[in-house]
Image: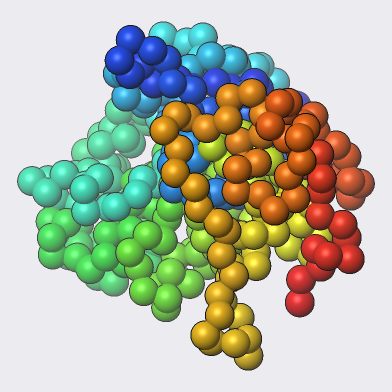
């Protein structure tokens, strides 16, 4: 059995706009080992969610994906999810891969009771009867920390707080006991205390169920609390990938350094906050060179006319940059 549960290889996603294909994910490679939590981090619009939706086969009608997404099952078989028809893909994704979507209020059906929504996947993929499904739903609602689960089973989404709705989304993703959990911005719009509880719950469920996870976020704080390994994405490309501690200690790509430098720190000057310079683009970026070169303080002529290849910095740390940050410059407190 492979140590890798899911392999994303040379994934490209394009949106059809005005008779042209606009690339939004560009040759992305991501490995998700069994039992590890992988972070995919980057600013809004960089292609993180489209990458996750490609795995689940739920891209918008105007989008198309190419490359391969290899699922390694426990029986030793391997399947390219992009090559499957909808029926076969649903069978794998429904039972083997669970997903927590952004904004639980818009993801939950306001006209259905909580229990019915959580039970739906179980009835479809596990051939359970109604009595078994109800017992299992009440059990998992309790497991994710929802008080009075038998009462909440009959509640509607609007009757729950934001944190409770997010716990319901986790219960829905976990009800079929998947091998992989995809969490797309799992703490959006939650207060700090609730965010911490949700992250702790995701980590706990991954550990107790020996499950892998792909966590998609723009929040480096979420990454530091939850992830074992991190991929940094910018405008559709992976700029850097490394174990979490290595990335935070020694960022090699200027974009990663900018993300880490912009995190507010206790004791720092409250009147000054590091930022990454912004730039207005009329196109999808610099198609010939590095996508980050127009915002980068370390750019030179090469950056505008060629894409840097991936370099190995050691310790499982890889980056794509002509002018990487030196170790002495990149160390963080």
- Rendered location of residue 88, percent (x, y): 43, 13
* 134 displayed left or right of 281: left
Task: Answer whether residue 4 is visible to the viewer in this image.
Answer: no
Quarter holding residue 221:
bottom right
Looking at this rendering, what residue extends furthest in the bottom direction? Answer: 267
Between 161 and 64, the residue placed more toward the observer is 64
* 45 displayed left or right of 231: left
- Rendered location of residue 270, percent (x, y): 53, 87
Quarter holding residue 190:
bottom left
Which quadrant would the N terminus be assigned to in this image?
top right
- Rendered location of residue 176, percent (x, y): 42, 39
Residue at image coords 57%, 58%? 276
Looking at this rendering, what residue extends furthest in the front direction? Answer: 301
Between 167 and 30, the residue placed more toward the observer is 30
Which quadrant would the C terminus be assigned to in this image?
bottom right
Vertical relation: 64 (above or below) 261:
above
Between 233 and 163, the residue placed more toward the observer is 233
Residue at image coords 19%, 65%? 160
Vertical relation: 256 (above or below) 131:
below
* Total count of labels: 0
Looking at this rendering, what residue extends furthest in the left direction? Answer: 111
* 45 displayed left or right of 292: left
Task: Answer whether residue 24 is visible to the viewer in this image.
Answer: yes
* 161 displayed left or right of 89: left
Residue at image coords 30%, 28%? 124
Q: What colour-coding does the image apply?
A: rainbow
Residue at image coords 39%, 46%? 100
- Rendered location of residue 75, percent (x, y): 66, 22
């Amino acid at each position: 059995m492979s140590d890798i549960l899911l392999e994303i290889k040379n994934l490209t996603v394009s949106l059809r706009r005005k008779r042209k294909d606009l690339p939004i994910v560009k040759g992305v490679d991501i490995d998700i080992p069994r039992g590890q939590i992988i972070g995919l981090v980057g600013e809004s619009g960089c292609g993180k969610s489209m990458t996750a939706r490609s795995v689940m086969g739920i891209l918008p009608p105007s989008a198309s994906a190419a490359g391969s997404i290899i699922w390694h099952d426990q029986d030793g078989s391997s399947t390219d999810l992009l090559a499957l028809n909808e029926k076969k893909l649903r069978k794998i994704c429904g039972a083997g891969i669970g997903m927590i979507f952004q904004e639980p209020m818009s993801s939950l059906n306001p006209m259905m009771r909580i229990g019915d929504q959580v039970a739906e996947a179980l009835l479809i993929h596990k051939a359970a009867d109604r009595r078994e499904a109800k017992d299992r739903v009440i059990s998992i609602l309790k497991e994710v920390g929802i008080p009075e689960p038998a009462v909440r089973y009959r509640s509607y989404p609007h009757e729950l707080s934001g944190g409770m709705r997010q716990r319901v989304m986790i219960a829905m993703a976990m009800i079929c006991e998947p091998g992989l959990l995809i969490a797309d911005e799992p703490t959006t719009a939650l207060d700090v205390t609730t965010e911490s509880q949700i992250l702790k719950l995701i980590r706990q469920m991954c550990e107790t169920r020996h499950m892998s996870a792909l966590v998609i976020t723009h929040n480096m704080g979420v990454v530091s609390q939850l992830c074992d390994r991190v991929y940094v994405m910018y405008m559709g490309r992976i700029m850097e990938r490394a174990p979490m501690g290595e990335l935070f200690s020694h960022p090699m790509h200027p974009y990663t350094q900018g993300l880490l430098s912009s995190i507010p720190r206790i004791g720092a000057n409250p009147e000054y906050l590091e930022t990454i310079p912004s730039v207005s683009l009329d196109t999808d970026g610099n198609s010939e060179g590095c996508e980050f070169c127009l915002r980068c303080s370390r750019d030179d002529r090469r950056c505008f006319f060629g894409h840097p290849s991936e370099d190995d910095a050691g310790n499982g740390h890889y980056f794509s940059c002509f002018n990487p940050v030196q170790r002495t410059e990149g160390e963080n407190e």
